[in-house]
Image (spheres, rainbow, N blue to C red):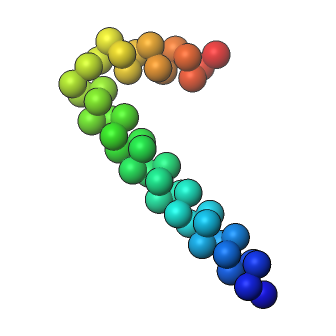
Amino acid sequence: MYSIFIVITVELFLLIGVVFWIKKLKSKQDRQPSLSKKIIKNLKF
């Protein structure tokens, strides 16, 4: 029971972290569009 609860909490924290990371990337894209384009190209490959 406890192990399942720990896994769920860890997954929630990871999801929250990913959401904040995406928001940071979006804010950086507005400031530096050239770098964001390079990141998008790398993600496509």
- Residue at coordinates 53% horizontally, 57% vertically from top-left? 15
Name the one closer to the observer, 24 or 3: 3
- Residue at coordinates 32% horizontally, 12% vertically from top-left? 34
Which part of the image, by quadrant, shows the N terminus? bottom right
Query: Residue 10's spot in the image, x, y percent?
Result: 61, 66
Query: Residue 42's spot in the image, x, y percent?
Result: 55, 17
Up/down of 37 relative to 11, above or below: above
Query: Residue 5's spot in the image, x, y percent?
Result: 68, 80
Number of numbered discs: 0
Up/down of 18 relative to 25, above or below: below
Q: Please, which residue is most extreme toward the bottom here?
A: 1
Which part of the image, by quadrant, shows the C terminus? top right
Up/down of 35 relative to 7, above or below: above
Displayed quadrant of residue 4:
bottom right
- Residue at coordinates 76% horizontally, 78% vertically from top-left? 3
Q: Please, which residue is most extreme toward the left here?
A: 31
Up/down of 6 relative to 39, above or below: below
Please indicate whether residue 2 sits to the left or right of residue 12 in the image.
Answer: right
Please indicate whether residue 12 sits to the left or right of residue 25 in the image.
Answer: right
- Residue at coordinates 40% horizontally, 15% vertically from top-left? 37
Displayed quadrant of residue 24:
top left
